[in-house]
Image (tube, grey):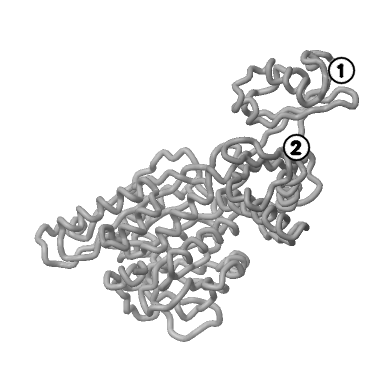
Amino acid sequence: MKIWRAVAALMLVAQAPAFAAGTQEHVKFPDAAGTFYASDPVELSASIETYLTKAETVSLPGPIFAVIVPHAGYPFSGQVAAQAYKQLLSRSYKTVVILASTHTEGFQGIAVYPRGLFRTPLGDIPVDQEFALQLMSRHKEIFADERLFDRQHPIEVQLPFLQKTLNDFRIVPLVMGDVSRASCTYLAESLAEVIGKRNDVLLVASSDMYHGYSIPDAQRIDRVTLSYLEKMDAAGVFQALSEGKAQLCGGLPVYVTLLTAKNAGHNLLRVLDHTNSAQVTGRTADGEWTVGYSSSVIDQPKQEGAMFNRTQRKRLLQIARTSIEAYLKNGKPMEVSEKDALLNQTMGAFVTLHEHGELRGCIGTMVGRQPLYLTVRDMAIEAAVGDPRFSPLRPAELKNVEIEISALSPLEKVKSADDIVMGKHGVILKRGFSSGVFLPQVATETGWTREQFLSQLCAQKAGLAADAWKDPATELYVFTAEVFSEKEE
């Protein structure tokens, strides 16, 4: 069963009157002002400032990539939401992607509000049209439909908080309807691709938690849900929601947010606050409608020095495998295109093949002369059929081959061997017309000392005396490599 169907009965539909009469082209007027939050700008501003003042500042080591926040009326969930929004006060974002489940009519796919402005009592927020268009171009289930944003309070209630905590930003509102798990994966991968290496994009997942009539059940089920969130167990969240063990009325947005964060290299979620409507109102007896609220941040930075997120790594590995497969079948390189800006940068790269754990081919180029994705395509083919140490790979062998890619940084000449950091630096050694190269992982795999590493580089790769690296006439260049393989992905 798809999650939207599973949680549709839990959704509270806001039937709020429009904030302003009349229409204005490409302006989305508020529906929830006067019901979910104050319609008077002074009163609204003061209420949010009160929530933010009461919220605590949390020490977070890295940039906040995403927040998960509730979307009930401010008197119920405003203080919980403020706990996450307060952490944004000293930060800067240019684009805020807001993900919510539909709370009005059901539909298939993911709707995007593609242009114009969203208006609140505190002013207008522009839509990031360029980001929206890039996102829609990546999958047929992501489409523009402004009509589907009428009375979608899970989107709207986030806007005044954003206006009070951020400056000079644009939004990309997304409303998710009835979509499959595979479509969620496509959306997460598309978001990661459009975000790329930007560090000024924030994801906001809009979701309340338990919906029901039992206070003990609210506490118990929310604990289960939060346990999956704290582990950033996206698959566990999806399964628990499908089986009714957990509850999130924004289940799909939260699931996609977790996937996107992990694709981008972020893997730490912190639950900042949690309560429910019974606790907020001081009610202790069962029998009345109870809703759970929590706020969380995903703030773990990408691994230091990492160039590529998970989506980019998977794409390069896919290009390598399909390139080998096509060449073994047709005898010529396949045509391939790539939109990702980083994968279009000129870089050197090596492609290494292992069969049953044994080296089966390794070919690369130290100096990039074309976009990285094309370098990977060509080096993958060469590793399969052009490494003189091995016979050409046969089609039947490919299923047993594990592919590893090493994307290389520019070369840097060092003054002495003491500047080489084992396990971090690859090394090119040059003397006259002789040269040799070892990738950084050679030191890790062999356990060699620096002296052994350089001696083997001289003897094995450059055809020089083992101690030639000590000669002042020998030039040493270092580089780093980001190494990833199918085994890890």
Of callouts 2 and 1, the N-terminal one:
2
Q: Is residue 167 visible?
A: yes
469 w.r.t. 45: above or below: above
| Residue 94 pos. (x, y %) | 57, 57
Say which residue appears at 43% left-offset and 70% top-offset.
179
**Residue where numbered disc 2 is placed:** 410
What residue lies at 73% left-to-right and 56% top-to-bottom?
Answer: 327
**Location of mark 1 (residue):** 473
Distance from Cα at disc 2 to Cα at disc 1: 22 Å
Q: Is residue 112 above or below residue 362?
A: below
Q: In the picture, residue 120 is in which quadrant?
A: bottom left
For this orientation, the residue located farthest to the bottom is: 22
In this view, the residue in front, 187 or 351, is 351
User: SS of the residue at dot 1?
Assistant: loop
Q: Quadrant of residue 101?
A: bottom left
Q: Nearer the viewer, residue 112 or 430?
A: 430
Left or right of 224 on screen, residue 313: right
Q: Circle 2 sits in a helix, a strand or a loop, which is it?
A: loop
Given residues 29 and 3, the one toward you in this image is 3
Res 198 seen here: no
Image quarter for residue 128? bottom right
**In this image, 46 relative to 175: left or right?**
left
Residue at left 25%, top 58%?
A: 245
The quadrant of the picture occupied by the N terminus is bottom left
Given the current orientation, which residue lies at the most extreme left position?
285
Q: Residue at x 40, y 63 (%)?
A: 252
Relative to 177, say whether 267 is above or below: above
Q: Nearer the viewer, mark 2 or mark 1?
A: 1
Q: Amino acid at mark 2?
A: Pro
